[in-house]
């Protein structure tokens, strides 16, 4: 194993252990590093420490020539800047050649969300007489009731759920824990899944662990597995729209704001470090209010 491979592995371990990033995020970082190492090879650069600012500019030119989106370029710059910060911290490099590179501004897309009628169709697509259907309903109810991320959802353990207080202990990004309440629909779905569906799956496969969400073999459900589950739910429903886990998170935030919740509360529930991350939802709610006004005001 070469020096660069060892350094890359150390960085990925740092992201997992110290930064507590999800496997999904770590894979993105790894891919960005592999792309940069390929570029280094093309330029006959043998070590990360040999990279200079002029090399970085050449790398950026290559990215833009590949017609990558500004979002993709910005992510790669951010990944590599973080990587070199790590190298400086570990005294494996003497400079950060990405420090002076400006990240291209990314157009903020308005978050997609489900209307309440669409969510009702999704919930009905789950067959709650079946253990897997009970699990699927619990996933939907939990994601919509709490607005948690996929990685947070897959890391829930049974002891993190307080049925008496209807609250969930969420292990967020950067090891930042928060408590999020959930409502009656989620409580009923969770209770049914834990006492019936999950119990049946675990017994059938002779499994024993305390992770809440399990696959059909009784093992912990991965983030990739959860995405597959959501896609299957959409296929079973009459909806034509696509689903991704963040769409339920967006729906959670949008519906709260539409119904009068204040921004700071939504920020805390979502686990956003900065209010600016939450403020994008105000654009959605304004559009929703305007649409409602135009549809219902007599002189619109």
Image (cartoon, grey):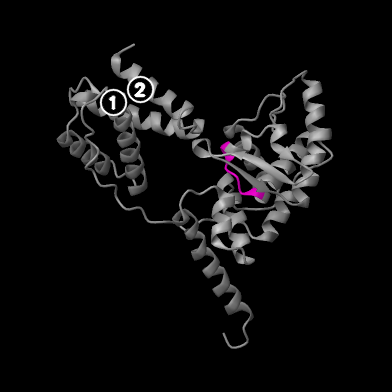
105 to the left or right of 229 = left
The reply to whether discs 1 and 2 touch (Cβ–Cβ < 8 Å) is yes
Residue at the outermost top position: 1
Residue depicted at 29% across the width and 30% down the height: 36
Q: Position of residue 45 (x, y in %)?
A: 19, 23
Determine whether the residue tagged by mark 2 lies in a helix, strand or loop: helix
Q: Which mark is residue 37?
A: 1
Determine whether the residue tagged by mark 1 lies in a helix, strand or loop: helix
- Give me the C-alpha separation between circle 1 and circle 2: 10 Å
* Depicted 199 relative to depicted 106: above or below: above
Residue depicted at 81% across the width and 42% down the height: 128
Q: Position of residue 215 (x, y in %)?
A: 69, 29
62 to the left or right of 167 = left
Q: Is residue 57 magenta?
A: no
The image quadrant that residue 67 belongs to is: top left
114 to the left or right of 135 = left
Q: On the image, numbered disc 2 is attached to which residue?
A: 8
* Range shown magenta: 146-151
| Residue 113 visible in rendering | no
Q: Is residue 148 magenta?
A: yes
């Amino acid at each position: 194993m070469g020096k660069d491979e060892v350094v890359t592995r150390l960085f990925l371990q740092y992201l997992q252990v110290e930064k507590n990033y999800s496997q999904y995020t770590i894979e993105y970082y790894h891919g960005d590093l592999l792309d940069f190492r390929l570029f280094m090879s093309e330029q006959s650069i043998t070590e990360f420490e040999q990279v200079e600012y002029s090399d970085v500019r050449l790398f950026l030119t290559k990215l833009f020539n590949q017609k990558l989106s500004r979002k993709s370029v910005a992510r790669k710059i951010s990944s590599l800047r973080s990587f070199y910060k790590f190298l400086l911290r570990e005294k494996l490099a003497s400079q950060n050649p990405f420090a002076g590179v400006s990240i291209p501004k990314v157009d903020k897309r308005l978050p997609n969300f489900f209307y309440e009628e669409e969510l009702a169709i999704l919930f009905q697509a789950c067959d709650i007489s079946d253990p897997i259907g009970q699990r699927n309903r619990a996933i939907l109810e939990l994601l919509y009731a709490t607005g948690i991320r996929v990685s947070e959802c897959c890391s829930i353990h049974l002891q993190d759920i307080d049925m008496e207080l209807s609250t969930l202990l969420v292990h967020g990004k950067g090891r930042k824990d928060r408590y999020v309440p959930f409502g009656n629909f989620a409580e009923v779905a969770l209770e049914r899944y834990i006492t019936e569906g999950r119990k049946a799956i675990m017994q059938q496969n002779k499994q024993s662990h305390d992770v809440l969400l399990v696959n059909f073999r009784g093992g912990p459900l991965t983030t990739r597995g959860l995405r597959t589950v959501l896609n299957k739910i959409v296929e079973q429903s009459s909806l034509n729209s696509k689903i991704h886990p963040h769409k339920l998170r967006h729906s959670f935030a949008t519906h709260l704001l539409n119904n009068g919740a204040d921004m700071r509360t939504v920020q805390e529930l979502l686990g956003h470090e900065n209010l600016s991350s939450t403020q994008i939802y105000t654009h959605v709610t304004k559009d929703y209010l305007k649409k409602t006004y135009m549809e219902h005001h007599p002189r619109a």
